[in-house]
Every structure is written in structure tokens, then in C-alpha cells.
Image (tube, rainbow, N blue to C red):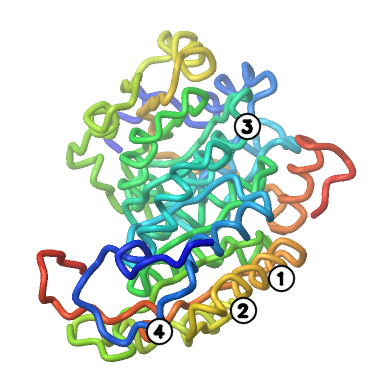
């Protein structure tokens, strides 16, 4: 946390990315990415994970396969992604062209006392995604790269992974709903229609 | 339906305890998946599932996804349901332990989750490494909130899968069908195939 001043701020970064979401479907990983997404504005087509650590990418994959004409954006953290690294291989083998993953990478476990994650030790998530076979995978560090990042996440042929390095800050808690059946049914009704079964 | 040979049902040779051949249970289970409009089939392979997996791969209306670990399937099927599609998760009993925390996603959100599990470490298992997980598979699933159907005869496989799908998709439950080693045959390690 030595050079925090020079780094991107997670809240502003997430808000910038979500500003261009259009009709994209958004899945968030537990912890700060869920709060960042809520801070940018709750939305019925946000599905927030509050647990099942390591599952954000796989939920996004199943959704992307079921909805091939919609963009699916998975918004998660470095710790959450590291718990399910194999999912990157599964995504790459399946190659859904409508799936994009953005990692808000602060190199720390923000929920548990800011212990360092493997990305702090140099583990390169974009490099892993590239080696798995993602069509696009890159690391972003500067604000002037965010316009291109948003274009990549919403327009490029997937699967896409962008690892965005951000400062390890504790931002004000903005808590979205955590009632699972509510989030599920709200999402399905917004996507599939009001008569959809729960 | 012509009567299949043992090899057609399961190419994994060197097994004991198989029920009398005469039923093509993988085809029957596959037919139930079809009738239930299953669109996503996700799996970590097992010899006992080999024929069913082949049938699903060959079905143009089913998307098959191979997993690196079984818990990925819990997430993928939750996402599929969010997107309006039904799926099933195929695995061996050792994979159930890999799923435990992920199962909280299905339970807390009441996502339908259908797991078809081929058993190891159970009926006449000779690999001791399979026994610890195989012996607690059903209890683990029940503790995690699953409705569990144990199948001992080939004749019951398709109806158990049908029942599991009905309870899962109508009620938002996790339902697991355990296909026993007595039904599938027990691996004897006498040929070139090496299952884990």
C-alpha cells in the first residue's frame, strides 16, 4: 500500500466500467466488487454473490451459454478469482464469445484484514487467462486506459479478461440486497419476463 | 430397442457385480433429460457416465461443458438457470466433496440443482483411497440440504433422475441421484483403464 496515490481507485473504476453496460448482464464476486457494483447503482440485472467464493466466473459462464446474444460481465476480485483459477481453463475451453471478466485487483484480501494475495507476489492473472486461451487478456493500471478497457469488455469477441490494478482502499460499505431468492427471481423476471417461475 | 451388450453399456471392462444386462439405462436417462428440456450438461467424467456423456455430446440441443473441478458445475448451472436454461451435473462420488461450499449457492438462492453421481468406494471397491469419500457421499449431500435418491438397480435409474429433476426444477431444491457400484459394476484394475 506504498504507492496507493498513483493507483486507480476501485469505486471510480467500477463506476466508469458500468456506465457503459447497456443491456449487459452483470455477476459480481463476493466482497468489495459486490459493494463497488452496488455503489454504482443497484440494477435488476445484477446478480451479486455474497458467498460461494470462487464461483463468480462459473455463474457468468453458465449465464453466457444460456444467453448467447447478451453480453455477460463478471466483476470480481483477485482473491475470489484465485480460489477458482481452474474456471479460467473451463471458460477458455468453452470460448463463449459474449463473456467478459474484469478483475478489480488490489492484491489483497480486503474483507479479512488486507492480507496479501498471490497477485501481490507477482502472479499474473491476465497472463494465466492468455495461456488458457482467452481471446483477449490484459492488465490495466492507468485511468487513461479505461475507455479502451470498457470497449474491450463490452465489444471485443470473448472470452475477455481484464485485470485492473487498483489501490488497496477500504471504501464506505454499500450493501446491495443479499436475499438469494429475491436476487434470483428479480434477475430472471427482468431478463425473461414477469411470468417467469421463481 | 435391441438388447445392448455389456460393452455397449459401459466400455470399462473388468468389473463385477453388474446387474443382468438388458436395460440400456444411459439411453433411458438421456431420454428423461431430453423430456425435461435439459440444455446444459456439465461434468467431470467417470467411466460409469461415459455412455451418457457421449449421448449428451451428440445431442444438438445440449451444451456440454467439461469442468476442472465439480464445484464449477454448481456455479455454471446457477448461471444457466438465471439465463433461463435447465442443466444437470454429472460426476463421480469423489467430486461431491469438492462441491460442499459451492452448494451453499444453490441452497441459499434456491437454485434448482440436479446432480447425477456415480459411486465409488462403496459396493466391492478394491481401491481403498476411494472408500472414505464414497462412504460419506450421501450423508454429505444430505447435510448440505440435498434430496438424495440412491439407485441400486439399472431399472430404477431413469425414474430416479426424473423424480430428482421434478423436485429440483419445481421447488428450487438440490437433488442428487447416486448410482451405486452394484448397478454400475466395480472396477477391478485388471485392464488398461485407470480411474481415479
Read off the residue under disc 3: A67
The local crowd at label 1, few if under 14, some if 14 to 19, many if 20 or more residues have their Cα within 10 Å, is some
Q: Residue at x 75, y 38 (%)?
A: A44
Marking on residue B167: 1
The local crowd at label 3, few if under 14, some if 14 to 19, many if 20 or more residues have their Cα within 10 Å, is many
Q: Position of residue B93 (x, y in %)?
A: 37, 74
Is the residue at mark 3 from the same chain as the one at mark 2? no
Is the residue at mark 4 from the same chain as the one at mark 1? yes
Instruction: Reply above or below: B175 against A60.
Output: below
Residue nearest the viewer, comparing A102 with B57 = B57
> Is the N terminus of chain A in the top left, top right, bottom left or bottom right quadrant?
top left
Task: Give the CA distance from mark 4 to mark 3.
Answer: 42 Å
Task: Give the CA distance from mark 4 to mark 1.
Answer: 27 Å
Closer to the observer: label 4 or label 3? 4
Q: Residue at x 65, y 61 (%)?
A: B112
Disc 1, SS: helix
Instruction: Reply above or below: B113 against B179.
Output: above
Task: Give the CA distance from mark 1 to mark 3.
Answer: 25 Å
Q: Position of residue A185 (x, y in %)?
A: 77, 50
Read off the residue under disc 4: B19
Amino acid at each position: 500500500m506504498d504507492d496507493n496515490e498513483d493507483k486507480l481507485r476501485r469505486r471510480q473504476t467500477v463506476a466508469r466500467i458500468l456506465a457503459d453496460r447497456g443491456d449487459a448482464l452483470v455477476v459480481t464476486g463476493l466482497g468489495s466488487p459486490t459493494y463497488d457494483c452496488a455503489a454504482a447503482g443497484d440494477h435488476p440485472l445484477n446478480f451479486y454473490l455474497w458467498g460461494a467464493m470462487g464461483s463468480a466466473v462459473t455463474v457468468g459462464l453458465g449465464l453466457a451459454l444460456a444467453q448467447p446474444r447478451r453480453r455477460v460481465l463478471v466483476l470480481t476480485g483477485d482473491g475470489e478469482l484465485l480460489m477458482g483459477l481452474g474456471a479460467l481453463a473451463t471458460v477458455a475451453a468453452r470460448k463463449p464469445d459474449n463473456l467478459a471478466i474484469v478483475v478489480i485487483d488490489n492484491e489483497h484480501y480486503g474483507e479479512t484484514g488486507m492480507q496479501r494475495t498471490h497477485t501481490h507476489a507477482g502472479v499474473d492473472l491476465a497472463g494465466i487467462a492468455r495461456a488458457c486461451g482467452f481471446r483477449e487478456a490484459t492488465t490495466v493500471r492507468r485511468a487513461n486506459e479505461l475507455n479502451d478497457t470498457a470497449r474491450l469488455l463490452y465489444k471485443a469477441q470473448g472470452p475477455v479478461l481484464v485485470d485492473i490494478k487498483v489501490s488497496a482502499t477500504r471504501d464506505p460499505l454499500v450493501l446491495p440486497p443479499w436475499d438469494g431468492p429475491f436476487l434470483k427471481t428479480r434477475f430472471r423476471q427482468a431478463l425473461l419476463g414477469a411470468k417467469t417461475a421463481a | 430397442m435391441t438388447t445392448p451388450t455389456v460393452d455397449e453399456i459401459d466400455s470399462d471392462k473388468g468389473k463385477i457385480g453388474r446387474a443382468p444386462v438388458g436395460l440400456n439405462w444411459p439411453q433411458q436417462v438421456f431420454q428423461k433429460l431430453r423430456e425435461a428440456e435439459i440444455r446444459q450438461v456439465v461434468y467431470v467424467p467417470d467411466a460409469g457416465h461415459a455412455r451418457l456423456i457421449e449421448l449428451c455430446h451428440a445431442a444438438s440441443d445440449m451444451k456440454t461443458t467439461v469442468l476442472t473441478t465439480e464445484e464449477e458445475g454448481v456455479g455454471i448451472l446457477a448461471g444457466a438457470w438465471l439465463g433461463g436454461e435447465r442443466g444437470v451435473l454429472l460426476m463421480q462420488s469423489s467430486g461431491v466433496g469438492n462441491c460442499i461450499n459451492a452448494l451453499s449457492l444453490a441452497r441459499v438462492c434456491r437454485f434448482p440443482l440436479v446432480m447425477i453421481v456415480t459411486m465409488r468406494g462403496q459396493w466391492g471397491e478394491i481401491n481403498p483411497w476411494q472408500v472414505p469419500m464414497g462412504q460419506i457421499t450421501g450423508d454429505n449431500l444430505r447435510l448440505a440440504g440435498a434430496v438424495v435418491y440412491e439407485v441400486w438397480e439399472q431399472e430404477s435409474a431413469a425414474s430416479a433422475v426424473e423424480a430428482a429433476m421434478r423436485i429440483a426444477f419445481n421447488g428450487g431444491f438440490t437433488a442428487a441421484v447416486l448410482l451405486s457400484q452394484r448397478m454400475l459394476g466395480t472396477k477391478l484394475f485388471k485392464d488398461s483403464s485407470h480411474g481415479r
